[in-house]
Image: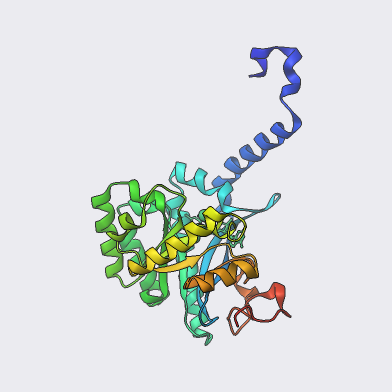
Amino acid sequence: YTKKYGRNNYTIYTEELDQKTTYKLTIEQDLKSASQNQEFVLHYQPITNLKTGELSAMEALVRWNHPELGIVPPDHFIPILEESGQIVSLGKWVLETACAQNKTWQDEGAPPFKICVNISPIQLQHPNFIPMVKSVLETTGLDAKWLELEVTESILIEDMKRLKECLTNLKELGLSMSIDDFGTGYTSLSYLQQFSFDRVKIDRSFIQGINTDSNSTAITSTIISLAHKLKMEVVAEGIEDETQLAYLQEENCDEGQGYYFSRPLPAELHAFPLSHNTANGLKKNKKPPLA
Ligand code: C2E
Ligand code: MG
Ligand code: MG
Ligand code: MG
């Protein structure tokens, strides 16, 4: 690139661009040994029942604890692992670790709640996916009813017949399924209906627009009421303040997740008993948000 434009244009290759390229190359290179070096960790973010204030689930979110870069967010490395196919083995580790952690919480006497695990479309397409999930449930001893798998909307445009079959087989194991980041793709809720998802998670971009952007507010209430008509529960992602929460409660949204309740935290930082007003280590002295 620089050669093509000659020496005089060397300055367009800015320092910032240089840093970005180095970062990307470092990540791609170091990812190869990250699993082996046990550098992946899971953080957990509570999902709160907006009617009772009780904890209804925890979502497992993977992070890469890089020896020099520190915590690397999943958006920076999941796409690379998807491209190379390595997401299959990382995904298995995530599922195992999350199910084992939920079993530990139950064994420690916490009131049981679901563990939600994000699944990449690449994993779902893998022929061994269903037997893998089955065997993880067996080895960890977690009852399938306490596991929920999250897939994003993009999965719906894949091979429909195969997907339906796959979802049916998964649900036969006794677990539940949710559709993540809903509203960002190109599908409609009525299209979603034929896939037997249990829950819809409204993408946080809409929640963040509540009370500031009339389109986001309208889309949010439309998703909630239509999902309910289709017998699906609704989770709002990315709740950050009281006004968003109040609106969602008024609109009958079932569950909520976001920094307002708690950021994703390592398992050991979640205080017991786990509920919305105690799980939030960042706002210990705050009054419970629910009336
Ligand atoms: P997601 O499944 O939609 O997860 C929610 C994301 O929103 C998380 O980002 C979470 O930290 C962030 N979030 C939660 N509450 C708030 C809030 O109030 N405000 C804001 N601004 N953000 C909030 P994170 O952990 O960076 O994960 C990003 C995405 O990476 C996830 O989106 C998911 O698609 C993917 N991901 C994470 N873990 C895994 C995994 O184990 N496997 C796969 N395949 N994908 C994963
Ligand atoms: Mg998710
Ligand atoms: Mg999401
Ligand atoms: Mg997302």
Q: How is the image coloured?
A: rainbow
Count of marks placed on residues:
0
Question: Which residue is depicted at the point 53% across and 63% down?
Answer: 237
Q: In the rendering, at what x and y percent does residue 98 appear?
A: 49, 68
Q: Is 244 above or below relative to 36?
A: below
Q: State which quarter of the image contains the C terminus.
A: bottom right
14 vs 268: above or below: above
- x then y, percent, for residue 283: 71, 75
Q: Quadrant of residue 3?
A: top right
Q: Residue at x 62, y 39 (%)?
A: 24
Q: Nearer the viewer, residue 166 or 50?
A: 50
Report whether residue 264 is seen: no
Q: Report if residue 88 is visible in the image.
A: yes
Residue 230 placement (x, y as % from top left): 32, 66
Residue closer to the observer: 261 or 144: 261
Most extreme residue toward the front is 214
Res 32 → quadrant: top right
Give left or right: position of 17 versus 198: right
Above or below 150: residue 143: below
State the image coordinates of residue 255 (x, y, percent, origin top left).
Answer: 49, 72
Q: Would you say 110 lies left or right of 123 here?
A: right
In the picture provided, is 153 more to the left or to the right than 50?
left
Quadrant into which the N terminus falls: top right
